[in-house]
Image (cartoon, rainbow, N blue to C red):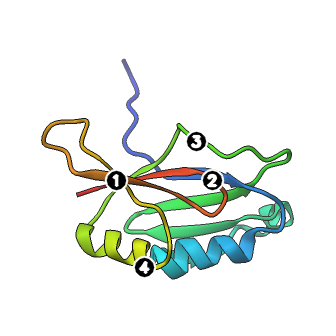
Amino acid sequence: MEFSIDRIDHVQVAAPRGSEVEAIGFYSGILGMKEVGKPEPLQARGGVWFEFGSFQLHVGIEEPFAPARKAHPAFRVSGYEEMQTQLKEKGMEVKVDDSIPGVERFFVFDPFGNRLEFLK
C-alpha cells in the first residue's frame, strides 16, 4: 500500500441554524476550547470552529438538523474529575459508563443533543 492515514485533523458535529453563540458558550466557555476563525469562503455557511491541542472541532450548520445521539467524538482529558464536577455545576447530565473494564469515561450531550465522550 502506498498511502497511510496519519491522524484525525478535525471532527465535526452538527447544530441548527443560528446556534453559533450557544456553541461558543459551550465549547469555549465550558469545555475551554479556543475559538478559531473559519476561512472566508466558508463563513456564509454559518457554524463555528474550535481548536484544542493540535486538533479542531467544527460545529457545522445542518438543515434539517438532527443531533448525533450515538455517533460521537471522544476526547482524552487531563483533569478528568474536575471536568465532571464543572459540567455538573453547569447543570449538565454526566453519564458515567463503566462497561469497558479498565476504562474510565463519561458522556454528555452538547446543547444541541450531540453525544460527546470524555476519557481519563
What residue do we see at 41% from left, 72% from top?
88
Badge 3 is on which residue?
69
Label 1 crowd (10 A; few <14 / some 14-19 / many >=20): some
Q: What distance separates the C-alpha of mark 4 from that of mark 2?
A: 19 Å
Q: Nearer the viewer, mark 4 or mark 2?
A: 4
Residue drawn where x is 25% and y is 36% of the image: 99
Label 4: few (<14), some or many (≥20) within 10 Å?
few
Q: Position of residue 67 (x, y in %)?
A: 67, 46
- Residue 82 horizontal side relative to residue 55, left or right: left
Mark 4 → mark 3, Cα distance in angstroms: 23 Å
Disc 1 versus disc 3: distance between alpha carbons? 14 Å
* Viewer-proximal residue among 12 and 72: 72
Q: Tell me residue 62's x, y (percent).
A: 79, 49
Residue type at the position of mark 1: Phe
**Where residue 32 appears, x then y in whole percent?**
45, 78
Specify which label sits upstream in the sequence, 4 or 3: 3
Which secondary structure lies at badge 3? loop
Q: Nearer the viewer, residue 118 or 53?
A: 118
Q: In the rendering, which numbered label is found on residue 89?
A: 4
Label 3: how many residues lie within 10 Å, few (<14), some (14-19) or many (20+)? few
The answer for how far apart the CA atoms under marks 3 and 2 are is 7 Å
Q: Name the residue rendered at 49%, 67% in the picture.
A: 92
Residue under circle 1?
Answer: 106
Task: Indicate the secondary structure of the residue bearing disc 1.
Answer: strand
Query: Does the residue at mark 3 contact the one at mark 2 (Cβ under 8 Å)?
Result: yes
Of callouts 4 and 2, the N-terminal one: 4
Q: Quadrant of the N terminus?
A: top left
